[in-house]
Image (cartoon, rainbow, N blue to C red):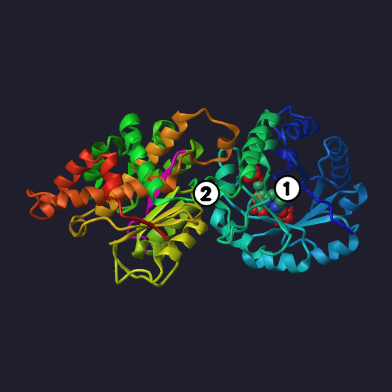
Amino acid sequence: MTKKEFDYSLYLVTGRDLLPPAKDYLESLEEALKGGVTLVQVREKTADTGEILDVARKTKELCDKYDVPVIIDDRIDIALAMGADGVHLGQTDMPVPIARALLPPDTVIGKTCNTPEHVRVAISEGADYVGVGPVRGTQTKKVKHPVVGPRGIGEMLQVLDGTDVKAVAIAGINSTNVLHCLWGSVSPTGHQLDGVAVVSDIMASQDPYASSKRLSDAIKAFYRSPLRTFSQGLSTAPYKVEGIKTAVGSILRSVKQFSPLVHQITNNVVTNQSANATLALGASPIMATAPEEMADLSKVTGALLVNFGTIQNLDGMLEAGRNTNINRKPIVFDPVGVGATAYRRESAQGLLSAWQATVLKGNAGELAAIANSSEVQAKGVDSLGQGFADPASFVRKLARQHRCIVVLTGVTDWVSDGHAVARLSNGHALLGEITGSGCMVGTAVATFCAGASTAAAAGRAADAEDDGMLVRGDMFVAAIGGVLAITIAAEIAAAREDVKGSGTFLPALIDELGKLTAEDLASRANIALV
Ligand SMILES: Cc1ncc(COP(=O)(O)OP(=O)(O)O)c(N)n1
Ligand SMILES: Cc1nc(C(=O)O)sc1CCOP(=O)(O)O
């Protein structure tokens, strides 16, 4: 018996208790269907059986008009009585094989999963799809399991590799975070969600048509090109060194032309020199930290840098990142000293779950801690030893896992978008003798990301393709540009006669950043694609 093929992309789970006053259930449902809902689950937790059956029948009658299948939550008897297309079962509901034996053979069965082990069991039991989560916090129900975030969803998706079991994420999804959810919920093997399940963003809406249309537009735009990265190497021709050199030069020109606002939440050791480095490159720094101002600020900034060297403003970092994602601007995350304490490790994982970083930057010790690798150790903010045996493979894998650009700094710097890997061999030993040179690299990367995304937004009107993008512009090239700006300016500064040591080096570095040209970048950049 062939199974029914569902479109899981915008899966509405109903909740009549959430309807705004005076809003009729069936009217609201019809508006949601017109807005683009592709699958409906009748979820009734308190009504009597007769009422649930009535609601389910009416739901099916309406959904049939739109060719949208109906699934019943928990109740096999109701599903049988009204001829549902499927049922959804929780961890403590009837086991899938027993439900399968009771239901017509083409009935689709979904199962709630909160861990990779749940997913393994659901596959072995013969579930057709899994509802994975909770991906975020939700007010709609008391969830027993901790929020797993997009990374936790990615781990569950990997278990589905090689099966045709579908997956939707659930909990806390709305039109402002749906792109982050879809983008970030990916396994290191590239396994993605088939859709998202939404309750309150549609059910509690005064305008369910508009709410579901907003969700539907973002979801459709995402799925038009779901394998995208923050770079353009996959969608256009593969990268070439000469092309990268030209592109970083034009991003530097864009920074000077648009002078974007670069919002930096950074540590108190480097705040001043980071702001000066931003100014020297031609952009405008703002070092705001209060959570209350993030919504306003993110509308006007070009990019956000979150550097948590002296973590004091975790709430500000959370809010800044969430709002920067909503406004589709780049976020550079520099988890300084992340391996040093459990608090830093938990904070970093919390931030990486709450928002989607565009660039993840760190030294070998920091990135090893993010990747849970014991290959490289750290002492405080410094990396120990020789680094990774195979840095190219490490950055490529980490970039895929976090679906972002990864910058690994050291004597040699490595940048990857999960596909291409660039090895950058510029710099000077004096960079290791001043405090905060790594933090300045983060600042320069954020400045170049701001330049690239501002130029991309200015260069053409937003089109339907852009609706699926979290950030516009090529962030792989921007990250390379930021690294090169600091390392090349360092080479020029170190060669100056007036530079006698680290004390005279820092101001000279700021001077040379200010004088850096596109031509300097192109002629001095030592880039290899590996
Ligand atoms: C798509 C989807 N995913 C998860 C759930 C939750 O189902 P369950 O665990 O049975 O919890 P209740 O819905 O009974 O509260 C769902 N309904 N749909
Ligand atoms: C029904 C349900 N199940 C969940 C789970 O985590 O298993 S969360 C949830 C409700 C999700 O509602 P909203 O979209 O309003 O956040």
Q: Which residue is mark 2?
A: 229
Which residues make up the magenta segment?
329-339
Counting residues from the N terminus, which is met first, the one under dot 1 or under dot 2?
1
Residue 360: give x, y in percent of width and height.
41, 53
Residue 303: give x, y in percent of width and height.
39, 39
Helix, strand or loop under label 2: loop
Main SS of residues in magenta? loop
**Three-letter code for the amino acid on which mark 1 is drawn:** Tyr
Q: Disc 1 vs disc 2: Cβ atoms closer than 8 Å?
A: no
Q: Which residue is mark 1?
A: 8
Which mark's residue is nearer the viewer, 1 or 2? 2
Occupied quadrant, residue 414:
bottom left
Helix, strand or loop under label 1: loop
318 relative to 61, above or below: below
129 relative to 460, above or below: below
> Does ligand 1 reach within 8 Å of label 1's beta carbon?
no
Residue 474 shown in magenta: no
**Three-letter code for the amino acid on which mark 2 is drawn:** Thr
The residue carrying pointer 2 sits among few (fewer than 14), some (14 to 19) or many (20 or more) residues within 10 Å by Cα, namely: many
The residue carrying pointer 1 sits among few (fewer than 14), some (14 to 19) or many (20 or more) residues within 10 Å by Cα, namely: many
Occupied quadrant, residue 178:
top right
